[in-house]
Amino acid sequence: MSVESLPDLDMLWMGLCSTIRHGATAARLGAYTPGVVDALEPGVTPWAARMLAAEDLIRNAAAGLDSPQDRAVRLLLGLSPGTAGLRVSTRRARAADALRIAPASLRGDREHALMWDLAVQVCKLLLQR
């Protein structure tokens, strides 16, 4: 992908922040944050394929983060095994535990910083396509 066709980083970051509430599995992305799917996987391919590809891209970007941020992002976004159906407060508590901080300390600036790092990593992976 060329630099010109990358999604706007600020818009991507805001979209990823919005995935925190419901999670970033393909089904949740398609149902609650379709704009994130459109930003990550534009095109005319079938919607289900685009949702699955967007989830894979987010998973791969999370895996590219340093530890323990990688684990915290996967927990927060419901991408770790057994976390997709959990309430956001439970996922937030588990993510905070991975970072060894209180859940109240994660919410807000810390979460936004994690999502910024994830957005940058997503762009890095898109450039490698």
Image (cartoon, grey):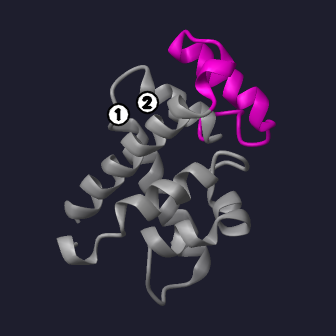
Residue 25 % position (x, y):
63, 53
Q: Which mark is residue 86?
A: none
On the question of residue 28 being in view, the answer is yes
Please name the amino acid that badge 2 sits on. Asp
Q: Name the residue tied to disc 1.
A: 65
Residue farthest toward the front in the current orientation of the protein: 109
Q: Residue at x 39, y 51 (%)?
A: 119
The residue range painted magenta reads 79-107
Labels 1 and 2 touching (C-beta < 8 A)? yes
Residue 53 % position (x, y):
48, 65
On the question of residue 55 being in view, the answer is no
Residue 1 % position (x, y):
22, 72
Instruction: Examine the image and state in which quarter residue 64 appears.
Output: top left
Residue 68 % position (x, y):
43, 20
Along the line of sight, the residue nearer the viewer: 8 or 45: 8
Q: Name the residue tied to disc 2.
A: 70
Please name the amino acid that badge 1 sits on. Leu
Q: State whether residue 3 is above or below residue 12.
A: below
Gap between marks 1 and 2, in whole Å? 5 Å
Q: State whether residue 57 is above or below residue 3.
A: above
